[in-house]
Structures are given as structure tokens and as C-alpha cells.
């Protein structure tokens, strides 16, 4: 009988310790989401609307992989910066476009050094020859922008960025994202 009580007491104390450690760990992780991830996305938006290819590129890891909404892939920060110079530089299709801010749909800390952000965003409709579809008038395409972030010291960098044009399907049932 004493062994049984001792085993139950040990089990109970172990369970309480593990629960406390998990709660402490999840509180530390949960505290990162509203501050770090939102701040990161605002910094990204600022770089994008300033049309600064180098500022955009520096938010990405050296070995980043970017897949744009057309399925084109860019690998590495240098290749990304070249693409941003084309898009945002003088004469580029995005050079004079004022972009709306992204809206976070979901941010998750996967571990203390890795996180994801899913955000809604808008980009201009593109036409032939990589130019805006309607000249000075900018019709917008709804996008889902998904970031895989890695923590480098006190800052986040994009390890992978995927953009998807949104053509919603209405399910015959309700979900959190499809009311």
C-alpha cells in the first residue's frame, strides 16, 4: 500500500512539474506572436511600400526560397534583390504603385526560432510583358502570403515566402475562414 501511494504521489508530482513547464513554455511562445510577428510584417510592408529592393532583400535569409503568385521561383537573397530591383526600380511595374498593408490571418510560433505568418495582401493585376494590366489604374488581386520565418538573434528573417492568388471556393458548410 505504501508503494502504491508513493508511486501515485511521484506520478502526480511529475505530472504537475511537466504541466507547469509546458505552461511556462507556451506562455513564453505565446508572448512572441502579437509583438514580434506583427512588428516583422509591418517592417516588411514598410520596405515594400518604400520600393527599396535592398531593404526588402535584407528581411530574407541568405538561402531564401520565394515562390510568387505566378509560380516563378527565386532562390537566395541575391536573386531576390535582382527581382526586386526590376519590380520596384525606376520603370519597373511596381515603382509608382502604393501597396495596401498586409493583414495577419494567422501567426504561429513553431518553436522559439521558427514561425509562420499567413496574411492577406493585394497586388496589382499584371498584363503582358510584366507590366501593370491597366496602366495608371490599378485593379488588385487578392493574395495569401505565407511566410516561414527563422529567428536570427533578436530579429526574424524570411526562410521561405509563398504567394498565392486567392480564388475562393464556397464550401457548403461554415469554417473559421469561410463564413
Image: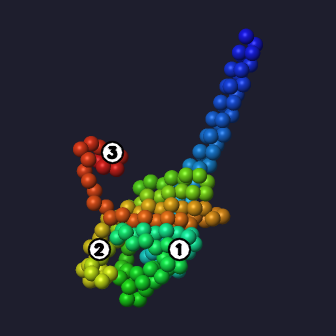
Front of the two marks 3 and 1: 1
Alpha carbon separation for disc pair 3 and 1 = 36 Å
Q: Residues within 10 Å of mark 1 (few under 14, many from 20)?
A: some
The secondary structure type at the circle numbered 3 is: loop
Alpha carbon separation for disc pair 1 and 2 = 26 Å
Q: Which residue is mark 2?
A: 125
Residue 147 placement (x, y as % from top left):
48, 62
Q: Which mark is residue 55?
A: none
| Observer-nearest of 2 and 44 | 2
The secondary structure type at the circle numbered 1 is: loop
**Which of the marked residues, 1 or 2, is nearer the chain's N terminus?**
1
Q: Are marks 2 and 3 in contact (CB under 8 Å)?
A: no
Q: Residue at x 29, y 70 (%)?
A: 140
**Which of the marked residues, 2 or 3, is nearer the chain's N terminus?**
2
| Observer-nearest of 23 and 148 | 148
Q: Residue at x 66, y 64 (%)?
A: 153
Q: Which mark is residue 175?
A: 3
Is residue 127 something that shows in the picture?
yes
Quarter of the figure that contains the N terminus: top right
Alpha carbon separation for disc pair 2 and 3 = 28 Å
Q: Is residue 78 above or below residue 71?
A: below
**Which of the marked residues, 3 or 1, is nearer the chain's N terminus?**
1
The secondary structure type at the circle numbered 2 is: loop
Residue 72 placement (x, y as % from top left):
39, 72
Q: Are marks 1 and 2 in contact (CB under 8 Å)?
A: no
Q: Which residue is mark 1?
A: 76
Q: Residues within 10 Å of mark 3 (few under 14, many from 20)?
A: few
Q: Residue at x 66, y 35 (%)?
A: 18
Q: Residue at x 49, y 72 (%)?
A: 75
Amino acid at each position: 500500500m505504501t508503494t502504491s501511494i508513493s508511486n501515485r504521489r511521484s506520478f502526480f508530482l511529475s505530472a504537475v512539474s511537466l504541466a507547469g513547464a509546458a505552461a511556462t513554455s507556451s506562455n513564453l511562445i505565446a508572448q512572441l506572436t502579437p509583438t514580434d510577428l506583427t512588428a516583422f510584417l509591418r517592417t516588411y510592408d514598410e520596405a515594400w511600400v518604400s520600393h527599396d529592393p535592398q531593404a526588402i532583400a535584407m528581411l530574407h535569409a541568405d538561402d531564401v526560397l520565394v515562390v510568387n503568385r505566378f509560380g516563378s521561383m527565386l532562390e537566395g537573397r541575391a536573386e531576390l534583390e535582382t527581382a526586386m530591383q526590376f519590380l520596384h526600380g525606376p520603370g519597373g511595374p511596381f515603382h509608382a504603385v502604393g501597396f495596401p498593408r498586409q493583414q495577419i490571418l494567422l501567426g504561429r510560433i513553431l518553436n522559439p526560432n521558427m514561425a509562420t505568418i499567413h496574411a492577406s495582401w493585394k497586388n496589382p493585376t499584371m498584363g503582358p510583358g510584366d507590366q501593370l494590366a491597366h496602366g495608371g489604374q490599378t485593379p488588385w488581386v487578392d493574395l495569401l502570403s505565407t511566410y516561414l520565418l527563422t529567428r536570427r538573434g533578436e530579429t526574424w528573417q524570411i526562410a521561405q515566402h509563398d504567394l498565392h492568388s486567392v480564388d475562393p471556393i464556397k464550401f457548403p458548410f461554415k469554417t473559421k475562414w469561410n463564413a
